[in-house]
Image: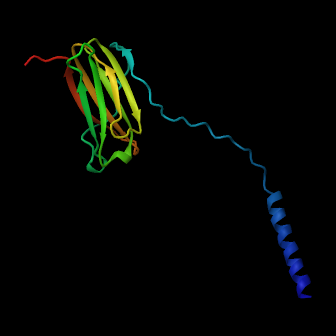
Amino acid sequence: MKRSLWILVGITLVLCIWMAGCTQPSQEQTTPAPTTMPVTTAATSVPTSPTQGPPPTAGYIEGPLPSQYSVEVQVDRNRVAITPNITVTFRGGKGINFVHSMDVVVSRSDGRIVTGSLYKPQVNDYLELEGTRGTDNVEVFINLITGDRYRVYNNPEAFRSYN
């Protein structure tokens, strides 16, 4: 008798579970939209004009970075050779794990803007951008995984200075 009671209880549970699954309204399956990942791009040159939209440096917090996110960057200007390249090197720091990307914007003296980015930069990763033989303004932005964007470097860099 006990055995047949357990079988009856088991069959009742199976029927309840089966009925609960069959009586729910059908739901349409939706395909999630594809996500895009940021891509490290090579340096590009874009001419500027007064009718363009906001400059590419809009939407940032003026540095320095908060101490828990601190990292170092090094900007070098090739002042000796005939190629006026600007090299920006990511030197790392205690906030390296919080850095999503590093963006460099060079406002050249001929009116063009050259940009470059490093995604998840590691120590000694660098960008080399083409400058002019005049004075070019270099801006370096650190984008954190928190979504904050800090300008950590903003200086004019002359090709040659005669002091």
Q: How many labels does the image show?
A: 0
Location of residue 160 by image quarter: top left
Q: In which quarter of the image is the N terminus?
A: bottom right
Residue that extends furthest to the bottom in the rendered view of this protein: 1
88 up-or-down from 64: above or below: above
161 up-or-down from 36: above or below: above
Question: Which of these two is toward me, 6 or 156?
Answer: 156
Q: Position of residue 107 (x, y in %)?
A: 29, 20
Residue that extends furthest to the front in the rendered view of this protein: 81
Question: Which of these two is toward me, 83 or 118?
Answer: 83
Q: Residue placed at 28% from the left, 28% from the top?
A: 139
Q: In this view, does 52 lie to the left or right of 34?
A: left
Q: In this view, does 7 lie to the left or right of 106?
A: right
Q: Position of residue 123 (x, y in %)?
A: 34, 40
Q: Where is residue 2 in the image (x, y as percent from the top left)?
A: 88, 87
Location of residue 143 by image quarter: top left
Q: In this view, does 117 lie to the left or right of 63?
A: right
Colour scheme in use: rainbow
Q: Where is residue 37 in the image (x, y as percent from the top left)?
A: 51, 35
40 up-or-down from 72: above or below: above
Q: Residue placed at 27% from the left, 43% from the top?
A: 65
57 up-or-down from 147: above or below: above
Location of residue 110 by image quarter: top left
Q: Quadrant of the C terminus?
A: top left
Q: Residue placed at 48% from the left, 34% from the top?
A: 38
Q: Residue placed at 36% from the left, 23% from the top?
A: 115
